[in-house]
Image (cartoon, helix red, strand yellow):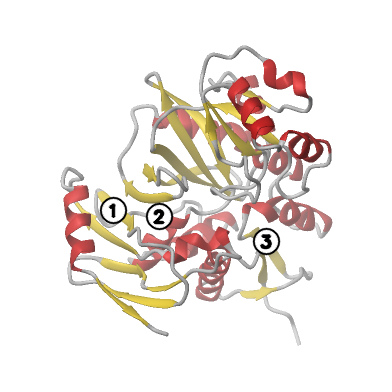
Amino acid sequence: MKSKRNIVLLGTDSRDSRAKARYYTRAARELGLAVRDYPDRRTLAVLPCSDFLAVDAARLARAHGIPGPDPLAVTIAGDKSLAYEFLRSRGFRTLFWHVPTREEDLGIALDCAVIVKPEKGSGSFAGYPWAYKTFRNLRAFGRYLKTRKLHRKFFEYQSRPDSLLGRFFVMEYAPTSVIHSVAAVVGDKRVEECAVGDLTTHPETKMPMSMIVGKRHREAAAAFAMIEAFAKAGLRRSVVYLQCIEHKGRLYPMDVNLRTGTLWAAAAEGLDLRLHTRILAFQLGLEPRLRFRWPAPYVGVWRMPLPLEGGRRRVIFGDGCIPLITELSYDPKKPYDIGHAWPMFAVAFRGYEDFDARADAIMASAEIRRLD
C-alpha cells in the first residue's frame, strides 16, 4: 500500500508545544496529509513545535533530503548571542550583550541596567536563581552572586552549560513592559508577514499577559527586514517570530522564536482562521502566498492574572469575548506551563483605545469554579 504524503512534528511535553502540535495536525489533515513521528520517503517537512527542537528538526530534514531550513541558519537564529552578532554584522542596531565566563567579565564598568538570560530557548523560565533577573549594572549582578553564595555555581555552569539552555548572557535592559513583535512565514521564494503587535509582560514573571495584534510600531519594517536577513541566510520554510524592545526611541531585537507565538496563535485558532493551515500550505509550496488575514484591524488577547493555586479550576466568561483557555491547572513542578494557570480570551475590534477597559470588564464578570 502506498504511504501517504506527510509531515513530522517534533515537540516537548509543555502545553504550548502540545498545542502547536494539535494546530499543525489539524492543518495537515485539512491539506490531506498524515502526521508521522519519523520521516519516510513521503515526508514533506519536519517541523518544530518548540524552539528547543528547531535545530533537531532542521538536521533531521537535512539527513533525509527533505526541504527545510539550513541547520546553520537555525543554529544562529536560535542562539541569542549568535543572532545578535549576525544582525549586527548585517547593519542592524543591537543593545549591549556579553557572555561572562570568568570573574573579570563582571567587572566591566557599564553604566546601564542589565538582564540575565539563557542563550537558547524562549520564555521566562530557565530553572536557575539568576535567570531573567534584572540588575542596576554588571557589577551589581556580580555582587548579587557573591551575596547569595552563587558565584561559584554560576561560573561552573558557564564552563559546562546545559545543552538546551546554553550559557547565560547579560544584556542591556530597557525598563519597559511592552514588547513589539513581528511574525512572518518564510517560504522558498517569499517572506510573508502573519502577525504584528504589542505584547505587555507581567512585571515579575516576565510572561506575556496581553497583546494587541495589529498595533504596528513605527519601526516594524526594520524588524521585518531582520527576518528577511535570516531568510537570505537560509532560514527558509520557517516561522520566524521576532520580539523587539524600544530603547531611547529606537527598536532593538530581543528574541528570535522559530514557532508561532502563544497568544496570537491561540487567538487565530479561537477565531477559526485556519492560521496553521495557511502557514503549512505556504511552507510546503502548496500555495504561492500565505493567504491569511485577521478579521478586524485589531485583535486583543489577554491572560487573566489569578493567584497560582493547585487543583483544577474552570473559568466561565460572559458574552463579548472568545474564550481561549478556560480549564486551569497549576503544577509547581512544571513552571514552564504557568500560562495555563491563567484564563485567556480574545476580542476582535476596530480600535484599541478602549483595550484595557474592555478587558477589565470581561475579567470582572468572569465566574471561577473549582473542579476538584
Q: Amino acid at mark 3?
A: Ala
Question: Gap between marks 3 and 2, in whole Å?
Answer: 23 Å
Residue that badge 3 annotates: 45
Image coordinates of residue 349 in percent, x first then y, are 20, 54
Q: Are marks 2 and 1 in contact (CB under 8 Å)?
A: yes
Image coordinates of residue 82 in percent, x first then y, are 69, 31
Question: Gap between marks 2 and 1, in whole Å?
Answer: 9 Å
Indicate the secondary structure of the residue bearing disc 2. helix
How many residues crowd mark 3 within 10 Å: few (<14), some (14–19), many (20+)? many
| Residue nearer the viewer, 20 or 107 | 107
Q: Residue at x 46, y 66 (%)?
A: 340
Q: Earlier in the sequence, mark 3 or mark 1?
A: 3
Looking at the image, residue 328 sits to the left or right of residue 172; the answer is left
Indicate the secondary structure of the residue bearing disc 3. strand
Q: Quadrant of residue 364?
A: bottom left
Q: Quadrant of residue 306?
A: bottom left
Q: Residue at x 53, y 61 (%)?
A: 281
Q: Residue at x 58, y 27 (%)?
A: 171
Question: Gap between marks 3 and 1, in whole Å?
Answer: 30 Å
Image coordinates of residue 138 in percent, x first then y, are 61, 22
Image coordinates of residue 65 in percent, x first then y, are 80, 57
Q: Amino acid at mark 2?
A: Trp
